[in-house]
Each structure stands twice: as C-alpha cells, then as structure tokens.
Image (cartoon, grey):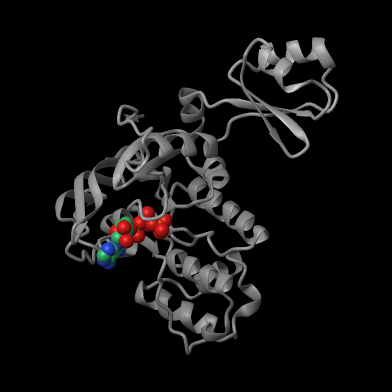
C-alpha cells in the first residue's frame, strides 16, 4: 500500500465502536443490541450462520446502512449520514460490490483510485497483490466470479485505507487465491491497518484473526481470541483408531473417553483428557496408526452456534462472554 503506515494512531481510541445497535427489517430483527469495540490495528473476524446479521452489522459500521437505534463511531466520528471525511480512511468490499462493467480491469481500478485521489502507481501495485497483474486489459464483464472478487478487494485497498472492511472476501476464491489473500491481509495488518472481515471459513479466521465475534440471530454471543475461545470452551479432542484394533465397548471404558463413534475406517474417541487416553490406548493396543485431532475454532463455533440457536431445544443463553 502506498499510504503512510497508520501505526502511529494506535494509542488513540478504538477504530470502530458499536454501542447497543439494533436493526430490524419488517418483523425480522437482524441486529439485536450489539456492543463491540474494534481496536486500532486489530484483525477482527465476524462469524455466524447465514442470516445471522453479519453483513447488516458491517454495513452499519461502514455507514452504508442506518441503525434503528444505538451508536456507531469510526475513528471517533459517526459514519452516518454519509461522512465524506471518513471515506478516504476506509476501504469497503461488500458482497454486492459495484463495478464499471464496460471498463477494463485497469480502467476500473484507475477510476476507483481517482475517486479517492490515490496515486496511479497504486493501481498496478494493487492489481499485482490481488493476483490480477496479468489481467489489466480484460473487460470487467469478462472476468470470472473469483477474479471479480479479487477486483472488489483491490477496489477496497487501492487508496491505502487505515480501516478495511471485507465481507466474505475469500468466498469465491480458489485455494491458491485464498492463501495468497491471507498473505495480503497479514501484510496489511503488519502495516498497522485495522481489518474487519466476515467469513464462513473457520480455519481462516483461526489463522488470521486477533479476535473473533460470533453472531447468532442478530446477537453477539461471544468475542474472544480464537485460541482463548478454544481453551475456554474446552472442545473435545478426537482420537482416530483404525477399526479392528480395539472393540467399541472396550474403547468406551478407557479412562478419559467421553464418547466413541465409528466414522469411515476408524473408531473415533472423544476426550478432554488426551494424555490419559493416549496412555491407556498405548497399553491396550499400541499407538501405531492412531491419529489425534485437537479441537479447532470450527468445533467451538459449531458448539456455540448450536447451543445459542433459538430454534434448537438445547439452546442456552448463559455463555455470553467478551475479552
Ligand atoms: N435489505 C433487507 N431487507 C429485508 N431483510 C433483510 C435485508 N437484508 C438482510 N435481511 C435479513 O436480515 C437477516 C440478516 O441478514 P444478513 O445479510 O445481515 O446476514 P449475514 O449474517 O450476513 O448472512 P450470510 O452469512 O448469509 O451473508 C436475514 O434474515 C436477512 O434475510
């Protein structure tokens, strides 16, 4: 990015502050009393099932949508009604980003850059970093879905904003493109920029985010660091033992085993006491071919969203916590 590093601003207040924000469409409450501060220089991931309210909340933070009630500030100022002083400081990629479809890729990004007064050199550099360096002369109309997504991301980055909002930026990218974007995002964070993004890729959120927030039915039920969330919620580890090595009943009776299921060619032992179970397995059958899967953010996410879903009879509302 060509703009100066925003690192110097880090000591000031939060990049984004959301206070008790609510948004209702008809009789549907899309965002329900959300409070959240995103710190300067933070990489914050907003997670949640389809329809949980992520895009609506992000659009309210961006100043693209008006909240029914509550307060939002971006760098201490309200983004609504449209705050032109904030626009150069923010980069926005939405799920329905608009394009100048009759222009070429390079013309499109030049037009966007000019709107923000960004240097022309930034256009070539940004196309390179999103992997569109070889596509300058292709008409936007003729891009594939993933290439359009890359161009939308480039449009959010070309003016070197301090605060970057990305709504499911990796949704249509191929695996190579996804990993390449991870590196771009890590570099942006290393420059001191603040990133707020939504994703359904939990491995990605675990790898990239300083903190994640999980929205369920419009309510922010958890905000925490991914690793802390995993240890706090104590999701179980799984041990995969090749079938035939130990029978199901005997496996279930081993000390520390919480549950046993058969999946594919394995007995799957769930446990919160990995060492104890490994020692017991070693004594009974040896550890050759035994695989251990430690809990991931995805396990915790599924646990939380299942319990918090109001449609689910096991739902409980007593897990809210923030770090
Ligand atoms: N413009 C709108 N008019 C009416 N209802 C809307 C509108 N936008 C969103 N909704 C509804 O609000 C709820 C939240 O939608 P939103 O798009 O914010 O969720 P999301 O978490 O981003 O979902 P996804 O993961 O599928 O993108 C959904 O029930 C959706 O149908």
Q: Is residue 303 above or below residue 60?
A: above
Residue at x-position 39% and y-position 78%:
114
Residue 108 position within the rendered picture, expressed as x and y whole percent measured from the top left: 47, 81
Residue at x-position 53% and y-position 27%:
235
Q: Nearer the viewer, residue 214 or 271?
A: 271
Residue 134 position within the rendered picture, expressed as x and y whole percent measured from the top left: 66, 77
Q: Is residue 13 above or below residue 285?
A: below
Residue 244's quadrant in the figure? top right
The residue positioned farthest toward the bottom in the image shown:
102
Q: Does 259 sit left or right of 229 as displayed?
A: right
Residue 135's quadrant in the figure? bottom right
Q: In the picture, which quadrant includes the C terminus? A: top left
The residue positioned farthest toward the left in the image shown:
69
Q: Is residue 126 visible?
A: yes
Residue 141 position within the rendered picture, expressed as x and y whole percent measured from the top left: 52, 85
Residue 12 position within the rendered picture, expressed as x and y whole percent measured from the top left: 29, 40
Residue at x-position 42% and y-position 81%:
111
The residue positioned farthest toward the front in the image shown:
249
Q: Does 67 sit left or right of 228 as displayed?
A: left
Quadrant of the rendered image holding ligand 1: bottom left
Q: Does 316 sit left or right of 254 as displayed?
A: left
In this rendering, the count of numbered labels is 0
Q: Does 159 sit left or right of 276 as displayed?
A: left
Q: Is residue 55 visible?
A: no
């Amino acid at each position: 990015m060509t703009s100066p590093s925003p690192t110097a601003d880090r000591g000031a207040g939060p990049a984004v502050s959301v206070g008790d924000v609510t948004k209702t469409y008809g009789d549907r409450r899309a965002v329900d009393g959300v409070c959240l501060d995103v710190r300067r220089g933070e990489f914050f991931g907003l997670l949640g099932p389809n329809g949980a309210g992520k895009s609506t909340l992000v659009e309210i933070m961006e100043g693209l949508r008006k909240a029914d009630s509550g307060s939002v500030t971006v760098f201490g100022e309200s983004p609504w009604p449209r705050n032109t002083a904030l626009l150069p400081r923010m980069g926005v990629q939405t799920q329905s980003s608009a394009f100048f479809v009759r222009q070429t890729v390079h013309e499109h990004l030049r037009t966007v850059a000019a709107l923000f007064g960004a240097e022309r050199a930034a256009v070539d550099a940004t196309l390179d970093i999103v992997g569109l360096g070889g596509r300058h002369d292709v008409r936007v109309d003729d891009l594939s879905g993933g290439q359009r997504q890359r161009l939308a991301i480039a449009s959010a980055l070309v003016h070197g904003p301090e605060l970057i909002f990305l709504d499911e930026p990796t949704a249509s990218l191929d695996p190579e493109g996804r990993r390449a974007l991870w590196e771009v995002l890590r570099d942006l964070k290393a420059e001191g920029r603040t990133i707020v993004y939504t994703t359904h890729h939990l491995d990605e959120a675990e790898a990239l985010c300083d903190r994640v927030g999980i929205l369920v039915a419009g309510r922010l039920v958890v905000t925490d660091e991914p690793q802390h969330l995993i240890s706090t919620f104590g999701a179980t580890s799984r041990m995969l033992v090749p079938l035939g090595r130990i029978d199901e009943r005997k496996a279930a009776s081993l000390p520390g085993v919480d549950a046993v299921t058969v999946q594919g060619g394995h007995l799957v032992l769930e446990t919160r006491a990995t060492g104890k179970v490994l020692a017991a397995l070693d004594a009974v059958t040896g550890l050759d071919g035994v695989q251990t899967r430690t809990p991931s953010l995805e396990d915790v996410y599924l646990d939380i969203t299942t319990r918090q879903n109001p449609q689910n009879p096991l739902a409980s509302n007593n897990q809210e916590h923030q770090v």
